[in-house]
Every structure is written in C-alpha cells, then in structure tokens.
Image (cartoon, rainbow, N blue to C red):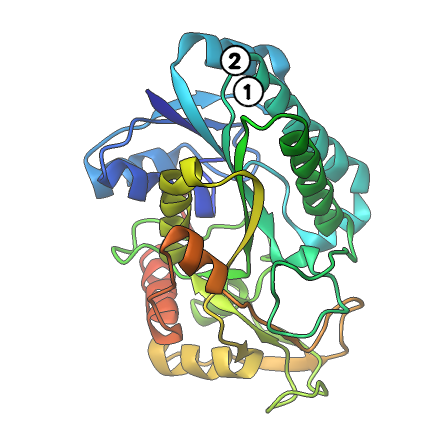
Amino acid sequence: MSLLITGGTGYIGSHTVVELLTINEDVIIVDNLSNSSTLVLERIKAITGKEPTFIQADVCDEKSLDAIFTEHDITAVVHFAGLKAVGESTTIPLNYYHNNVSGSITLFQVMAKHGVKNLVFSSSATVYGENNPAPMVESMPTSATNPYGQTKLMIENVLFDLAKSDSEWSIACLRYFNPIGAHASGTIGENPNGIPNNLLPYVSQVAVGRLEMLSVFGDDYDTPDGTGVRDYIHVVDLALGHVKALQKLGNLQGCVPINLGTGNGTSVLEIVNTFKRVSQQPIPYSVTPRRAGDIGEVFANANLAKELLGWSAERDINVMIEDTWRWQSQNPKGFEA
C-alpha cells in the first residue's frame, strides 16, 4: 500500500516525503518538474537512506494518472501540485485556473474511479481574503484577492461539494500560513526558479549575495514597526502536520479545513534583523509602497489542528531562520549547483 504525493519534489512536498519515509511509509511521487528538479530525489535519499518511487507526470494528464492508480495500490493522496506565485497568477490567470483547478478535478475524478477517497489537500491562508481580523479561524468567511487564491478557494469548494455528495470521502484541507526554514541538515530547502516571490528566500539570497537588495512593501501598517506581520511556520513542522493529517483521516468526516500555523505573528523587519544576526551578513533593504491586496496582520488560530490532529508547531522563528541560512549558505545557487 502506497501514499501518492503530487508535487512531491517541491519545497513542502519534499520535506513531507522525508518525514513519511522516516516512518517507513511507501511513497510515490508524481511531479511534472515545472518548478523543481530530480536532484531533490538524491537529497531525499541522502537524508533518509531511502528512495521514493518517482513518476514524471502532470496532474492534468488523466491517462497518466489512471495508469498510476491502476499499477499501484494507493490508499491516500497528498495533493501539493500546483502553480503558486501570487504575482504571476495575475499575469497568466488562465494557466493558474487550468493547472490548479482543472488538474485537481482530474486528479479527484481518477481517485474516485479507483475508490481512493482519502485526501490531504494543500490549501492556503489566502482563502481568508482581506476582511477577516487576525487570528484567522476556520469558521470565518472565505474570499480571495488574486487568481492564485481563487484557485485554492475554488478547489476547496469542489472538495466540500464532493464530500457532501459522497460520505466515503475523508478530506483534510490544510490551510498553510507562511512556510519558511529548511531541513536541519541543510540538504533540502526552498529553491525557487528565478526571482523569489516570498520574503525568506529573497532575504536569504540577498544575504548570500545573489540579489542586491530587499524591497519592503510598506512601513505604514498599524503594526509595532509599521511593516506587515505574518505567521511564519517551519516547513518541517508543516510537513509533520501532513503526516498527522494522513494518520487522522479515518477520524475526519467529509471535508475539514484546518489551519497550520504557529499562532504568532512576526514582522518583516523582525525577520530581516533576525536574519542579519544569524547570518552575520548585511541585508540592505528599501521601503517601497504597499502592494495591492496586502493587509497588515495575518496569523492563525491553530487550536483545531491540535484538537483534531494532535499537532502543533514546535520550532520558533530563530530555528526557522537558522535552518534557512544553513540551507542557503551550503547551497548558494540551489540544487543545480
């Protein structure tokens, strides 16, 4: 019996695969490698001493998915695969709707055909939109301000309707906050293609000399230092949340949204100053205007994850940044180097 991990060579997927192999799960990765590399598989083996089965395929390809489910005894799926850059989604929205929404529906149809109805879905705190006050609670109304967020929200709605139509489905919709950090070995970490879209890989690439300067989007928010506050969560804690969700799927009825966050907020300047201290490197930055749709403060209420999954985040911001810097300093040009 195997677990199918779509997008398993990506940032969060690869860390989750490591944790699953560590507890001797049989793992099959399906990835089209659009934003990752097969070199990740070598790193996973270096950490765990084990090799997951790897199949290069796209979740939009129904024929390939059908063959995978026919050839393997799959009991549950963790669905990470998807395009994920907010800015890019506003310039090529059709690509995002096709890949993320259509691809997910194709995957769910193939799962249903083969009687595999246990699913952990990689959702996002972006579904809380910009009108809910922090801390975010799963019962809050949802909305989205960009095509990427809309795709996550649409997939959640598909899954809610699917679970209502068929009581055999057990689905955990894990709403992530802001994943950062890397495996403690420095062997795998976040390796974005091109200019990073997220704060931490941008900061770490400035620190290692790949980028010249960080842009801080707004310093006039109603926060302690004027910069945006977010709930940063260590990617290994996040991976362990997926392991817990898989283990508890049998206890979940229908489609259940669950926040994965620390419940604490950290500002952009706190991140920058902590990274300077940890790395002993300068982090030059300039303040630029706010981005449309950004809000001042976002952090989770993570009580439901503790109640339903027995999970809570353990690693603090210092560990997150120490592990980020270890990864970046050991791999200044990412996997390809």
Check disc 2 and report the residue beneath it: 114
Gap in angstroms between the C-alphas marked 2 and 1: 5 Å
Q: Is residue 205 visible?
A: no
Give residue 73's position: percent from left, percent from top.
38, 15
Disc 2 residue crowd, few under 14, some 14–19, many 20+, Cα 10 Å? some
In the rendered structure, are the residues bearing label 2 and label 1 in contact, judged by CB atoms less than 8 Å apart?
yes
Q: Is residue 267 above or below residue 252?
A: below
Horizontally, residue 252 falls left or right of residue 109, namely: left
Horizontally, residue 310 falls left or right of residue 296, namely: left
Give residue 26's position: percent from left, percent from top.
30, 26
Q: Is residue 228 above or below residue 127?
A: below
Q: Residue furthest left?
A: 49
> Which residue does the image show at 27% across and 58% down from the upper left?
184
> Which residue does the image show at 22% across and 33% down from the upper left?
24
Q: Is residue 54 visible?
A: yes
Horizontally, residue 310 falls left or right of residue 212, namely: left
Q: Is residue 254 above or below residue 183?
A: above
Q: Observer-nearest residue: 187 or 26?
A: 26
* Picture quadrant of residue 54: top left
Q: Observer-nearest residue: 317 or 196?
A: 317
Give residue 305's position: percent from left, percent from top.
45, 57
- Looking at numbered disc 2 in the image, what kind of residue is underneath it? His
Q: Observer-nearest residue: 322 or 5?
A: 5
- Looking at numbered disc 1 in the image, what kind of residue is underneath it? Met
Check disc 1 and report the residue beneath it: 111
> Which residue does the image show at 51% across and 69% down from the upper left?
203
Secondary structure type for disc 2: loop
